[in-house]
Amino acid sequence: MGTVNPPDGCGERRAYPRLQVSLSAEYDAGTGWRACECLNVSPGGARLRCARPPSALSRIRLRLPIGDEADEAVIDAVVLNVADAASGGEISVKFVALQPEVGLKLVRGLAARNRPAA
């Protein structure tokens, strides 16, 4: 599979492009569900803003709304990066054991949900 190079030339390489979103979500790092905001998502992972971010390499479960209001996905993930506190507790997570077609369905559902009303 190819990688996606961002246009800003920062040298970062991704397997999938990220969809910019602003969604209320929840994560559980083994201590109960906590609120977070999903900032972007792809079939391979997501960027979250958490008031109390879990530590790097933590395994978490992420609950994201998809499609209509009643639809949600619960996805196992591992925390790859925790930004410093000055960035507002942003973390990068990689989805684990998520089939690519399920990841694409997730992104399509989120894109449809975030499409501006006509």
Image (tube, rainbow, N blue to C red):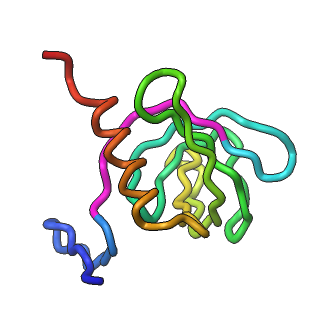
Image quarter in which the C terminus is found:
top left
* Left or right: 78, with 13 as reference point: right
- When the figure is inspected, residue 8 is found, relative to residue 37, above or below; the finding is below
- When the figure is inspected, residue 38 is found, relative to residue 16, above or below; the finding is above
- What is the x, y in percent for residue 55? 72, 61
Which segment is the magenta one?
17-26
* Left or right: 96, with 6 as reference point: right
Image quarter in which the N terminus is found:
bottom left
x 72%, y 36%: residue: 34
Question: Front-most of 63 and 48?
Answer: 63
Question: Front-most of 34 and 64?
Answer: 64
- What is the x, y in percent for residue 27? 68, 44
x 27%, y 62%: residue: 17
Give the quadrant of residue 8: bottom left
Question: Front-most of 24 and 113?
Answer: 113
x 84%, y 51%: residue: 30
Q: Does residue 9 show up magenta in the picture?
A: no
Q: Residue furthest bottom?
A: 1
Give the quadrant of residue 111: top left
